[in-house]
Amino acid sequence: MGGRGGNSGVGANRNAARAIQNIKTIDKLADYMLDKYDFSFYDDSLAKLDFEFVKAAAVEIAAIKDEFPQASQALRGIYVQSRSDGELALYNVYSRSIALSPSFIYGTAAATYSSQVRAGNAPEGGKMINIISHEMGHGLESALAQRNGTSLERHKEATRIVSNAAKVVKSSQGKDMKINDMVSQISSYATKNRSETLAEAVADYRANGARAKPLSRAIWAELKRELS
């Protein structure tokens, strides 16, 4: 699932963020995330990434896992994997993990994501860390599908969440609003399918908080209602 990307616009658990920022080595960070969040650093390639980014990613992962305890088992780990499709990252539904492209090792991921933001292909105000937010959003969708026995391939849970959120936005901002117009406000990538709408909404909310697009805020609220 698509690449999405430093501090988030929404605060993390302050104790967890402070503890992570004080960690000095990736081995200690891996131990902390496994012990506190049942979240694994799956390969040695992560040691090749900028350590400050890895710590920022750990803060973001911890924050989302704290927000959505019912989704914890759908958010299990992170690793680096070679890719040929140009995507910056994906959510691996089988391992329930985030796979980062080698662009994070080569130091090109930030520039690529920034260009996506400028082009409107990623949420306004997004930073490289919101790539992690986006993939965690796919994990939240996976958690709903696992719980309800529905198909991820058909985007049933994402479609339901986005539809319910759109009704909330319409009730407060006008019934004439079209759902596809709301989706396109988040980013052009969000229009790909409802799974990407949900993931981009999570990235938008994590980047911008109360300043996120109306549909993103409503999607976040729907996810909180179901997975908190």
Image (spheres, rainbow, N blue to C red):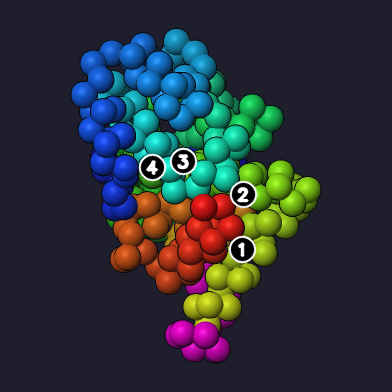
Q: Nearer the viewer, residue 194 or 14?
A: 14
Amino acid at circle 1: Ile
Q: Which residue is mark 2?
A: 141
Residue labelled with disc 1: 161
Secondary structure state at the residue bearing disc 2: helix
Can I make out residue 198 in this image? no
Q: Which residues are magenta?
A: 171-183
Report the residue marked by disc 4.
Answer: 63
> Gap between marks 1 and 4, in whole Å?
21 Å
Q: Earlier in the sequence, mark 3 or mark 1?
A: 3
**Residues marked 4 and 3 touching at CB (< 8 Å):** yes
Q: Quadrant of residue 167?
A: bottom right
Q: Which residue is mark 3?
A: 65
Distance between the alpha carbons at the discs numbered 3 and 1 = 19 Å
How many C-alpha atoms fall within 10 Å of the one at disc 1: few (<14), some, or many (≥20)?
A: many
Dot placed on the residue nearer the N-terminal end, 2 or 1: 2
- Separation (CA) of disc 4 from disc 2: 17 Å
Residue 163 percent coordinates (x, y): 63, 70
> Which structural element holds mark 3?
helix
- Tell which circle, 1 or 4, labels the residue nearer the N-terminal end: 4
